[in-house]
Image: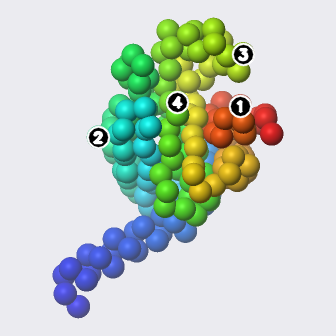
Amino acid sequence: MSDSNTLNFTRRGILGAFAATTVAAAPTFSQAAGFLRGSGDIRRIRMYSGRTGERIDTIYWIEGDYIKEAVNEINRFMRDWRTSDVIKMDLRTIDIMAASHNLLDIQEPYMLLSGYRSPKTNSMLRSRSRGVAKNSLHMKGQAADLRLANRSVNQMAKAAQACRAGGVGRYTGSNFVHMDCGPVRSWGR
């Protein structure tokens, strides 16, 4: 077997291990350590932003360690696009997003509608919509609003709820799902 075949096999093996093992639920506050130990060799997140035109497809965790450069890239990608403010996203939220995506068994990247929101942006959105929380977890880097073209809001919400790790909001009329690492709860239809 040539070296290139060995490398391809190894890469496929790693990606296969990720696909098979990250089906484990994302962490609840009391079960976080157990989730991290049992979630596989790698974690990957794929997203694009319709607002900025940017895309991200990165492995951010390998064999028990978060990759600092990849996490920084995710933080920048999930910034408040209106103000360009960047915050350290709560890694539990990223883990929930990655685990939910894996449960959906698709290659399509998430469309990120909202990650971090500065207080200024959150206040502006609250003035326009009653559906925006005053103390939104978006302002703490603990939430994301996501969409997929090839999965319904209900399918996405069920995958996120299967993680039993935070809040899941269905916004069927606007075609997106809210995922956060706050208390386990769900809302919407």
Sequence-wise, the earlier of marks 2 and 3 is 2
Kindly identify which numbered label has been placed on residue 69: 2
Q: Quadrant of the C terminus?
A: top right
Q: Identify the residue shown where x is 50% and y is 43%.
A: 111
Give 41 or 133, whichever is nearer the viewer. 133
Q: Secondary structure at mark 3?
A: loop
Sequence-wise, the earlier of marks 1 and 2 is 2
Image x and y of residue 40, in percent:
50, 61
Q: Identify the residue shown where x is 55% and y is 68%.
A: 20
Q: Is residue 76 above or below residue 140?
A: below
Kindly identify which numbered label has been placed on residue 183: 1
Give 20 or 159, whichever is nearer the viewer. 159
Side of 128 where 71 appears, left or right: left
Sequence-wise, the earlier of marks 3 and 4 is 4
Q: Secondary structure at mark 4?
A: strand
Three-letter code for the amino acid on which mark 2 is drawn: Glu
Side of 85 where 122 appears, left or right: right
Give 108 or 181, whichever is nearer the viewer. 108
Q: Is residue 92 visible?
A: no
Q: Quadrant of the N terminus?
A: bottom left
Three-letter code for the amino acid on which mark 3 is drawn: Arg
Image x and y of residue 112, in percent:
50, 38
Kindly identify which numbered label has been placed on residue 146: none
Q: CA distance from mark 4 to mark 1?
A: 19 Å
Residue, disc 4:
114
Residue, disc 3:
130
